[in-house]
Image: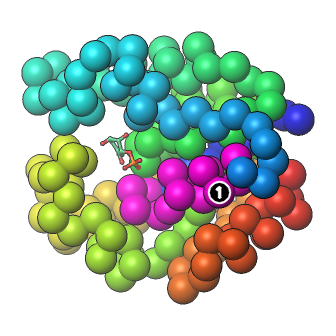
């Protein structure tokens, strides 16, 4: 199987859906954020705080390339597919699936989250603008799956039909 890259904004359900797919496909799942934390020995918040976002983006790209591109589901961070270098790599190496959720659903999932630096840095309006800014990039994924108001089971069934 070609690797499957799950993309989309924070709170779209990327990690949850990837874990559910893992059980069904019996394949490996790599969550890029977890991978970075493991490799760097510090949290995403600590990386942002000490070294800044640009440094984090370089790490993201470096580790994306390090993760195997076969038989794996890769759950990406919300900013991953907004960067051209990452889109290019993903397009060349696997299938990309954009998990879309509407702003109200995303907001209720991420509001007050202390582990996500961008949620700490931005107002809710700022986060909504960021989502709108990134949406055209997410829409360049091979497939879009709407998750709004749907169960994980239902979303997985649709994803499995695409890959
Ligand atoms: C980010 C999303 C986060 C994480 C980092 C930056 C973003 O991942 O990579 O905090 O730029 O949207 P999740 O989408 O898994 O929360």
**For the point 58% across and 33% down, which residue is it?**
30
- Pick out the residue farthest to the bottom: 149
* Ligand 1 falls in quadrant: top left
Numbered disc 1: secondary structure: helix
Relative to 137, say whether 51 is above or below. Answer: above
Residue at the spot x=60%, y=82% of the render? 150
**Quarter assignment of residue 43:** top left
| Residue found 48% across the figure and 15% down from its top | 62
Q: In which image quadrant can residue 155 be found?
A: bottom right
Q: Compared with residue 10, is residue 31 higher up or lower down, i.e. above or below?
A: above
- Quarter of the N terminus within the rendering: top right
Locate residue 9, reporting x and y percent.
Answer: 44, 57
- Percent x, y for residue 7? 57, 49
**Residue stretch in magenta:** 9-22
Magenta segment, prevailing SS (helix, strand or loop): helix
In the rendered image, which residue does mark 1 sit on?
20
Total labels drawn: 1
* Residue 2: x %, y % from top left: 84, 34
Say whether residue 133 is left or right of residue 147: left
Q: How many neighbours does mark 1 have within 10 angstroms: few (below 14), some (14-19), or many (20 or more)?
A: some
Q: From the viewer's perspective, is residue 156 above or below residue 5?
A: below
In the image, 6 versus 82, the foreground residue is 6
Image coordinates of residue 56 in percent, x first then y, are: 31, 25
Closer to the camera in the image, 154 or 23: 23
- The colour scheme used to paint the residues is rainbow
155 over 10 or under it: above or below: below
Tell me if I can see residue 91 in this picture: no
The answer to whether mark 1 is within 8 Å of ligand 1 is: no
- In the image, what residue occupies the spot 63% across and 37% down? 29
63 drawn magenta:
no
């Amino acid at each position: 199987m070609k690797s499957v890259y799950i993309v989309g904004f924070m709170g779209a359900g990327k990690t949850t859906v990837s874990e559910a797919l893992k059980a069904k496909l019996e394949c490996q799942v790599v969550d890029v954020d977890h991978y970075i934390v493991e490799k760097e020995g510090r949290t995403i918040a600590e990386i942002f705080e000490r070294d800044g976002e640009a440094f984090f983006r370089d790490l993201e790209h470096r580790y994306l390339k390090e993760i195997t591109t076969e038989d794996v589901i890769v759950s990406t961070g919300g900013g991953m597919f907004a960067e051209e270098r990452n889109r290019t790599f993903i397009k060349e190496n696997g299938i990309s699936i954009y998990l879309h959720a509407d702003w109200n659903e995303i907001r209720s999932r991420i509001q007050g989250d202390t582990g996500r630096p961008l949620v700490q840095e931005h107002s809710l309006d700022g986060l909504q603008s960021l989502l709108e800014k990134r949406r055209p990039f997410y829409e360049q994924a091979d497939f879009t799956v709407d998750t709004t108001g749907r169960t994980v089971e239902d979303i997985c069934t649709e994803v499995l039909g695409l890959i």
